[in-house]
Structure formats: C-alpha cells, structure tokens
C-alpha cells in the first residue's frame, strides 16, 4: 500500500507553542472561538514565527492586513490559548480573501471566498481524510482469515491507492504553479526502476537513483518553499541520511543544493547561513573542511552580500587559517629547539606516524592529559609512532617547561621542544592548548582535535586501517 495514504501529520492542525512582515487583506471568521485575538504565523526553516496579531472587529472578523504583500508560503492561523492552528496557502498573486470555519474542526468546516488555491487545498485535505477513513475500514479485512475476503480487501486498497494518486496528479498537472501543487508534489513517491544484479549491486543502484531524484518533486528555486513545513526536514534528510558523512561528499551535496536554490534569494540566503554556522560549530573531526569550502567559494567570492564587512573579514580569515591544517593536507614543516638548544625539524622524523602536541606550562587541562600522553608513548614508541611536543611558557621563560617535564617521569623520553619564534602555533592555527595533530609517514594530517586520553583508541584504528589498505594493495 502506498505511503501516500498513511500520513497527514504535516497537514492537519496540532497543538504546539510558537515563539518570534506584508497589500494583503485576509479576513477570518472563526466560529466556536471565545478568544478576542488571533495570530498569523509562518514556517521558516525548522521553526515557526509570529507574523501578526489582530483583535476581533465589530462584525466578528479577524482581519490581517498590510500595505506590503506577504512572502509566499504556508502560513498558520494560530488560536490562543492552546495555540492550535490551521494552515493557509499564501501566494504572491492573491492575498485578498476571506475564510469562515470552526475552531473545533477548521478543516472540514472551512468555507473560502476569493482564494481558489486555498479552496483546492482544503478540498484535497477533506478528500484525503475521507479516503483514509475508507482505507482503515478496508484494512481490517486484510487480516481476515477468510482468503476471499482478504484478497478482496487487497484489491480494494489497490483501487483506492490508484484513485488517490490520480487525484494528486490531476492537481499537479492542472495547476502546476499553485501552492496546492507545491504542497502535494513532495508526497508523491519516487518511482524507482527495477535493477538486476546481486543484492548489493541492486541496493546501490536503487540508492543512487533515489538520491539523484530526491528533489524531483520540489523546486528548490521556488521562493515559496522556504516557508513550508517540509523543506528543512527534506534538506536535513538529504544531507544526513542520503549523503555519505565524509566532508568531500557533503561538500558536493551542499553545492548541489545551493546551486538549485540560487534562483530564490531568500532560500539561498537562509541555507548558506545555515550551512556556514552548522559546520563552523561542528564537533565532528574533519568537518571544518566544509566550513572552509563554504567560506572560500561563497562568502569570500561575494555571494553573501548581506554579510557585514567586519564579519565577512572574520569568516575569510578563519578559512585562511584553517585551510593549511585540514585533514588530508600536507603538514607544514617547522623548526623548534630542545632544552640543549639543538634545532629539530618536524620533517626529520622518519617514522610511520608523528604526533605533534602543543601544550602550555600554565594549561590545567594539558597537565591532566600528561599521564595519558606518557602512557601512550611507552606503549607505541616501538610501533612506529614518534611524539614531538612544543611547549609555550606562560612567562616566556622556557625553564617553566623543563621544570614541568623533569617532574614527570618518562616525559623526558619524548622529543620535548619549544618554538622561540612562535611560528609553529600560527602555522597550525593553535588557539588553545592542548592541541594535537597525527601525521602519517608523508607528513599528511590524518587526525586532529582529539585528547591524549583518546590516543590509544584512535591510533589503533589508524594502524588497523593502514594495514588493511596495504593488504589490498598487495
């Protein structure tokens, strides 16, 4: 049975709380409603906001009016005190209409004058409600032990499903630019072709087709869809479920979405800001690459003109600082000195892995991590792993670093250094300590942003992965 018949949750009113501008004149008469105020809200991304509040007039109408048109989309007529709501479709071309309905049952009792789109939408909702009721009754016979009754129920459900699909298609074909069509099209299933091959091959082909056609029923360049209840959920699902969670794959998906959205200034702006903020604050190691890509290819190229000059400079500067230390990037060589004044180059290490550890003599968290670092070094120094520490003293006197090292047995077994020029911290964008980078034999950054207490687990995974890759190459 098609999923078309099974979900109405986004279309019927529900109870929830709302927290939060357009010529338009929308008159609403609400029977069975004792309150004297009514709110007009709207969907915006993953939230809902209040647009207007009006009092009832002497004729019994709540009239939302303004000199400017409302942005197109799905609006909410919100009924205090419980904040239940019913929906209105707002199109740029028709924002002068009236509605009469009942607060007890806004959908079935609705009468609309002056908006063919809203009338079509509510006719659809009531039609669908009736079909769902019909479906539930027929579905009871599907579990009947009588094979004939069960078979008849299955055929009836197939016929019902065909009727609903045709109703959908008639609206979409007959009124393709209507808000009703915009709301209905995403509910249509994506027809996936039949593929041949192994189960794994078929599954991959089905996934690739579904991902490629996921937005076929949604025009991402239509400015009205930003104010709908489904867009944010769709974009999130596409990014988190259909896109492999690797920065390179995620960047491709973001570029695809933003490319489609560029025809709608509002949608493009919302999601460009959304993606930048999301990956600027991401705690997932490696996703800073997505932030750098968005900053470099959109903000720093003038595609975010709404951004204040000072903020834009910060975004581009952050990207510039992060780019040299992205995972997969070849680490910059640095020269430091040890206690005896001898110079050491990072590239002098000829081990399979090198750990670059930045710490400070007055860093409390660094001191908590010291035992983990020492323990790790003792376990892994015979497994092709070297550690180079770089200390920054609080007072500028490096004696603080050496005194601390002398107090901790076995810490002196690592290569402990300092950087009198402080260039290393700049090159590696070290803004807080401790800060750690794991490099492979070619001095590429393969991990960062972890604590010394995670080193054992992470290093085991890295070594295991390297062994598996080497085995495949053989």
Image (cartoon, helix red, strand yellow):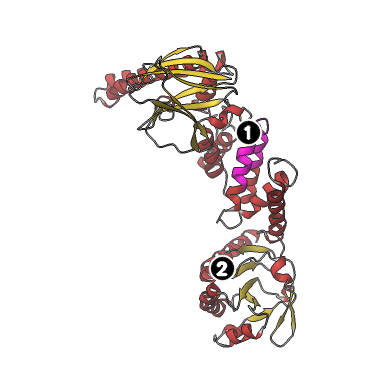
Does any portion of residue 168 appear in the rendered image?
no
Magenta residue span? 253-276
Q: Is residue 174 above or below residue 462?
A: above
User: In the structure shown, which secondary structural element does the residue marked by tag 2 occupy?
Assistant: helix
**Distance (Cα) linking label 1 and label 2:** 45 Å
Q: Residue at x 60, y 78 (%)?
A: 361
> Label 2 neighbourhood size at 10 Å, few (<14), some (14-19), many (20+)?
some
Q: Is residue 381 above or below residue 193?
A: below
Q: Residue 94's mark?
A: none
Magenta part, dominant SS: helix
Q: Quadrant of residue 270?
A: top right
* 239 vs 27, nearest the viewer: 27
* 103 vs 109, nearest the viewer: 103
Looking at the rendered image, the disc whose residue lies closer to the viewer, 1 or 2, is 1
Q: Residue at x 69, y 66 (%)?
A: 428
Q: Quadrant of residue 16?
A: top left
Image location (x, y in percent) of residue 407: 55, 87
Image location (x, y in percent) of residue 242: 55, 41
Relative side of 433 to 74, left or right: right
Q: Say if the magenta span includes residue 223.
A: no
* 155 vs 329, nearest the viewer: 329
User: In the structure shown, which secondary structural element does the residue marked by tag 1 occupy?
Assistant: helix
> Label 1 neighbourhood size at 10 Å, few (<14), some (14-19), many (20+)?
some
Q: Say if the magenta span includes residue 270.
A: yes
Name the quarter where the C terminus is drawn.
Answer: bottom right
Image location (x, y in percent) of residue 167: 47, 15
Q: Are marks 1 and 2 in contact (CB under 8 Å)?
A: no
Relative side of 58 to 51, left or right: left
Read off the residue under disc 2.
459
């Amino acid at each position: 049975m098609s999923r078309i018949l099974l979900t109405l949750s986004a279309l019927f009113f529900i109870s929830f709380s709302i927290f939060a501008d357009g010529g338009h004149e929308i008159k609403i008469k609400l029977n069975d409603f004792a309150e004297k105020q009514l709110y007009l809200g709207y969907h915006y991304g993953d939230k809902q906001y209040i647009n207007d509040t009006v009092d009832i007039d002497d004729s019994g109408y709540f009239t939302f009016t303004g000199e400017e048109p409302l942005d197109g989309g799905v609006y909410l007529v919100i009924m205090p005190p419980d904040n239940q709501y019913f929906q209105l479709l707002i199109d740029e071309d028709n924002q002068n209409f009236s509605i009469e309905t009942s607060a007890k049952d806004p959908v079935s009792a609705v009468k609309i004058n002056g908006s063919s789109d809203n009338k079509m939408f509510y006719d659809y909702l009531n039609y669908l409600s009736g079909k769902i009721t019909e479906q539930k009754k027929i579905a009871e016979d599907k579990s009947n032990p009588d094979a004939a009754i069960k078979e008849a129920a299955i055929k009836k459900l197939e016929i019902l499903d065909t009727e609903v699909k045709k109703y959908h298609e008639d609206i979409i074909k007959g009124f393709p630019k209507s808000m009703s069509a915009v709301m209905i099209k995403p509910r249509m299933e994506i027809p996936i072709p039949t593929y041949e091959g192994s189960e794994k091959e078929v599954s991959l082909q089905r996934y690739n087709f579904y991902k490629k056609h996921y937005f076929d029923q949604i025009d991402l360049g239509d400015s009205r869809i930003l104010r709908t209840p489904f867009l944010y959920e769709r974009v999130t699902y596409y990014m988190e479920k259909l896109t492999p969670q690797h920065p390179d794959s995620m960047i491709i998906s973001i570029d695809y979405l933003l490319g489609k959205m560029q025809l709608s200034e509002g949608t493009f702006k919302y999601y460009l800001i959304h993606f930048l903020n999301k990956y600027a604050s991401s705690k997932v190691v490696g996703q800073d690459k997505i932030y750098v890509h968005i900053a470099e290819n959109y903000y720093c190229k003038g595609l975010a003109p709404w951004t204040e000059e000072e903020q834009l400079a910060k975004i581009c500067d952050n990207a510039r600082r992060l780019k040299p230390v992205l995972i997969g990037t070849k680490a910059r060589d640095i020269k430091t000195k040890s206690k005896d004044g001898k110079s050491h180059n990072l590239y002098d290490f000829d081990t399979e892995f090198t750990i670059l550890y930045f710490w400070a003599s007055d860093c409390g968290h660094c001191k908590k991590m010291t035992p983990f670092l020492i323990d790790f070094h003792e376990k892994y120094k015979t497994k092709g792993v070297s550690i180079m520490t770089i200390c920054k003293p609080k007072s500028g006197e490096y004696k603080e670093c050496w005194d601390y090292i002398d107090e901790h047995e076995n810490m002196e077994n690592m290569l402990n250094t300092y950087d009198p020029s402080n260039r290393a911290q700049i090159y590696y964008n070290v803004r807080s300590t401790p800060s750690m980078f794991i490099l492979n034999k070619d001095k590429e950054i393969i991990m960062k942003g972890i604590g010394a207490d995670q080193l054992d687990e992470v290093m085991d995974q890295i070594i295991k992965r390297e062994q598996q890759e080497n085995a495949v190459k053989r």
